[in-house]
Amino acid sequence: MKQDDLLGTLIHDVAHLLRLDIDRRLVEHNLTRVKWLALGILQKRGALTQSELSERMELGAPSVGRLVDRLEERGFVMREQDPDDRRSYRLVLTDTAMALLKELEGTSTSLREDTLHSLNDTEVSSLNSGLLKLKKNLRSRVTVIIAVTSLTAFKTTNYSEAFSTMASAI
């Protein structure tokens, strides 16, 4: 049991330190991790709808909506009419964003090298594999918890009971 607690603490600590390092590297570009992530996804995947970006970033639609507004204000993305759906827009990177991402390629490479320099290829592969398995396990648990608590909330007329059930499940 104590080893499980240590693992959770280590994952938290590593994630926290990594976020601090990324923030330090991005400060001169007046960029946040989330903006960099969004731009990177659009660079890799091409034009996406806001909901597709939301899904890829694993963030809620309102958060991504505000993020896209800020990216548009900075001149990093444009909303273009989706040729297949007149009600939808696709997010497209601008030349300004492409130039910034080109400039940040070195940042990404040095971050990876600085973070993983003490691990050999086998250790890096094992770490990636293990973390992906943990993410998959946790994602399926969270999905089940959300589904169960949603069903519980809808079957009851007592809202305080529904919220209490959701809180205890989470």
Image (tube, rainbow, N blue to C red):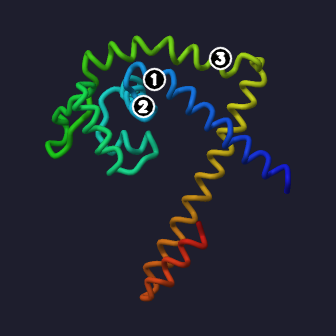
Viewer-nearest of labels 1 and 3? 1
Mark linked to residue 26: 1
Q: Earlier in the sequence, mark 1 or mark 3?
A: 1
Q: Residues within 10 Å of mark 2 (few under 14, many from 20)?
A: some
Mark linked to residue 32: 2
Judge left or right: residue 143 versus residue 81: right
Residue 140 in the image: above or below residue 115: below
SS category of the residue bearing label 3: helix
Mark linked to residue 16: none
Quadrant (top left/top right/bottom left/bottom right) for the C terminus = bottom right
On the image, the x and y values in percent for residue 33 come to 46, 32
User: Which residue in the rendered view is the most extreme toward the bottom?
Assistant: 157
Mark 3 lies on residue: 114
SS category of the residue bearing label 1: helix
Q: Quadrant of residue 1?
A: bottom right
Q: Residues within 10 Å of mark 1 (few under 14, many from 20)?
A: some
